[in-house]
Image (cartoon, grey):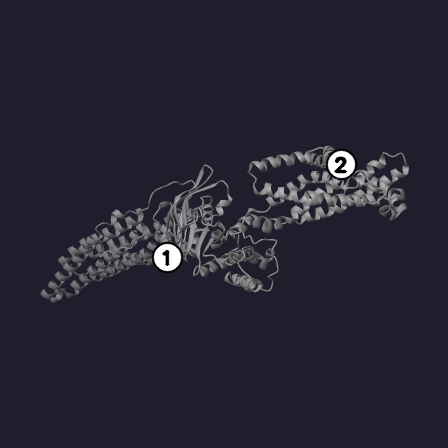
Amino acid sequence: MGEILIEKIENLKLNVLEMGELAVNMLKDAVLALKAQDINLAKEVIKKKEDIAKMDEQIEERALRMIALYHPVARDMRVIAAVLKMITYLARVGRYAKDIAKTAILMADEPHASKLVEIPYMSDKVVEMITDALNSFKKEDLSYLTNFSERDDEIDSLYYSIFRECLTYMMEDPKNITKCTHYIIVARYLERCGDHACKIAEKVHYMITGERIEIK
Amino acid sequence: MLNFRKIKDKLFLTFIFFGAFIALFPLFHIIFTLIIKGMPVIISRGTMFFTGTLSQGGIGPAIVGTFILAFLSSLIGIPIAFLVGLYIYEYPDSKVSEFVRGLLQIMLEFPTILVGVFVMDILVIPMGTYSALAGAFALAIIMMPYVSVYTAEAMRNIPYTYREASFSLGLNCFKTAFRILVPIAKRGIFTGILIAIAKVAGETAPLLFTAGGLYEIYPHGISAPVGAIPLLIYTLIQSPSSTDHATAWGASLVLLLVFIGVFIPIRLSLKEVKL
Amino acid sequence: MRYAIETRNLRISYGKKEVIMGVNFKIPEKVVFALMGPSGCGKSTLLRSFNRLLDLNKDANVSGQVLVFGRNIYSDNVDVMEIRRQVGMVFQYPNPFPHLSIYENIAIGLRLNKMVQTKEELDSRVKWALEKASLLEEVEDRLDDFPSSLSGGQKQRLVIARVLAMKPKILLLDEPTANVDPVGTKNIENLLFELKKEYTIVLVTHEPAQASRISDFVGFIYLGELVESGPTARIFENPQHELTDRYVRGILSIGDKNGRNTN
């Protein structure tokens, strides 16, 4: 009977990885849409939010059913516990991607200020972190999670540097206020996605080792 | 193809029925003959058949003798045999146990007439007379292996878990055996005793040189001779008188009835042995 | 801390075959300690060494120590029967004595062990035991009936009452619900949960879920060895040993002989 559950858990993991891929792609596309001022791409990202919400719901339902029917314990239980939290975090990443896409549409008419150069870099770093956390989940391998604390620190300092530079621009010329406010908000979204990547990493660590850690 | 199989089936069934019939035929024939030949004798002589002495045309002393012998032999044989049965159940692996079990096997198969000869040698000759005691003694020797084996078997049939339960309450070997296990097995043990008595009540050979026979007066002491129904039948058949032969048929029917009288309770109690 | 039962390098063999290979247990007082593991791995044998019921099997050899409240029950001057009264046992097949009434089943142990003096004492002890085993209400108007009229679960509670009447300190239960229907099982599990306030309970179970439901500590026995033991919550959330992990998840096949640790 345990084998049936194991198979179902493998499928559940695949579902989560699918959702993760979707979230990551949404984030990448949203920032790309922002940089390239591509309204169509932005609209596609916004549409995909529905898909990711549906995945959240379906995976949760499946996981809860497994608990009711199979009373999982030990490793099986920890995987399901990780899954239930991860889908929440990934759904949030998807929502932030949608919000960034909406911002992209708002900023599509006017040219960008130079600060945008930092946002794509920050986005790449965040995407790397989420991808590594998902790989760690897929392969049940802790090595992907080393340095997460330092990487999170890097994301935080990137946010603050964008924040300060935008302040400078806003003080220089009031016409920059709208633009720079949007940049700060987008950077803020990316920083939150980085936090979620850390939370996912914490859950994966618990899944593999049974120990709860905190990444700060 | 199907038809051939059906025919084979029918043939086989017929063959079995036929075989069973042949096997049971003698039994039915005996019962039938005894009733046909014995009933008229009993009816014509009435209750006197059961209460009168031989010259009065009755087998009263023989009936009483059979019961006395059954009773005495049980008294002598059962207690020891019961304890032996318990011993071989409780200590199945000891050397003594193995030896005793072998001995019991021999006793079960031993020619009963030799038992009679043995008892004649040690009791009848020193006492100088045939006696109920000697007869009972011979019957007891024949009865004992049955009681021992049935006792041990009945005990062995008790599920092991009751033994464990009893010991786990802090009871020792004796209390467990006598206060818990034997009462559980009592039906099986009792059945074994009945079977042994039934066997012994119908024995003739061991009584030939021990009991002596007593049919004109009622039994009057254990060191005096005594009669028994099978022994009487044996004696009467050899007589030239046809009255005696008639008496023999009547006695045979009575013996059959005694046998059935013991046999039915055995069957009933066997059915009820449920744990 | 005093342990109710402690074993030190306990080895048990039947003839040449070693069944329990050097196990070291520490079972605290007034808890439910579950022994779980696949069938045939020695759990029942191990349990029977805790009250020396193993003595009944002449092929069994025991070496090492079994300490009950600090005293080695396998040392020389030990009153085996007293131990068995202190460490009571309930079996896999509900086995109230079939030829005795419900009342007599409990009374007989008391009588034969001379544990009560008067009829009143006997009466009150029998009723007390039935009450403790949550059975009194169901049978009090038919104490002279025979156990055959009881359900499996009730029979088992009668057996528990029979044991409790001896006023033991430890209860050993060998797969007590293996032959009981689900409702009866539930009743017995609830009863054990209550009883652990006063008694130390060692429960052999063939079902890890039962261990997770009602035990405080768990020991996993596999092929005669104590693979892992500890608080139930930890064993079921994060077992340390690979074999334990596979067993609780239901994927251990009897041929496995893996010694790897998960961490």
In-front residue for pair B79/C217:
B79
Is the residue marked by circle 1 packed among few (<14), some (14-19), or many (20+) residues within 10 Å?
A: some
Three-letter amino acid code of the residue under disc 1: Glu
**Horizontal and vertical percent position of residue B174:** 57, 48
For the residue labelled by badge 2, is the local secondary structure a helix, a strand or a loop?
helix
Q: Evaluate whether residue B2 shows in this view.
A: no
B49 up-or-down from B13: above or below: below
Q: On what subunit does the disc labeled 2 rest?
A: B
In-front residue for pair B237/B40:
B237
Three-letter amino acid code of the residue under disc 2: Val
Q: Quadrant of the C terminus of chain A?
A: bottom left
The circle on residue A60 is 1
Is the residue marked by circle 2 packed among few (<14), some (14-19), or many (20+) residues within 10 Å?
A: many
Q: Evaluate whether residue B47 shows in this view.
A: yes
Q: Is residue B146 left or right of residue B180?
A: right
Figure quadrant of residue A119: bottom left
Figure quadrant of residue B120: top right
B58 up-or-down from A191: above or below: above
B253 up-or-down from C4: above or below: above
Look at 55% across and 52% down and name the residue there: C95
The residue that label 2 is drawn on is B124
**Horizontal and vertical percent position of residue A172:** 9, 65
The circle on residue A123 is none
Q: Give the spatial CA distance, label 2 vs label 1.
A: 98 Å
Label 2 vs label 1, nearer the camera: 2
In-front residue for pair C167/B252:
C167
In-front residue for pair A87/B126:
B126
**Horizontal and vertical percent position of residue B137:** 72, 40
**Horizontal and vertical percent position of residue B210:** 76, 37
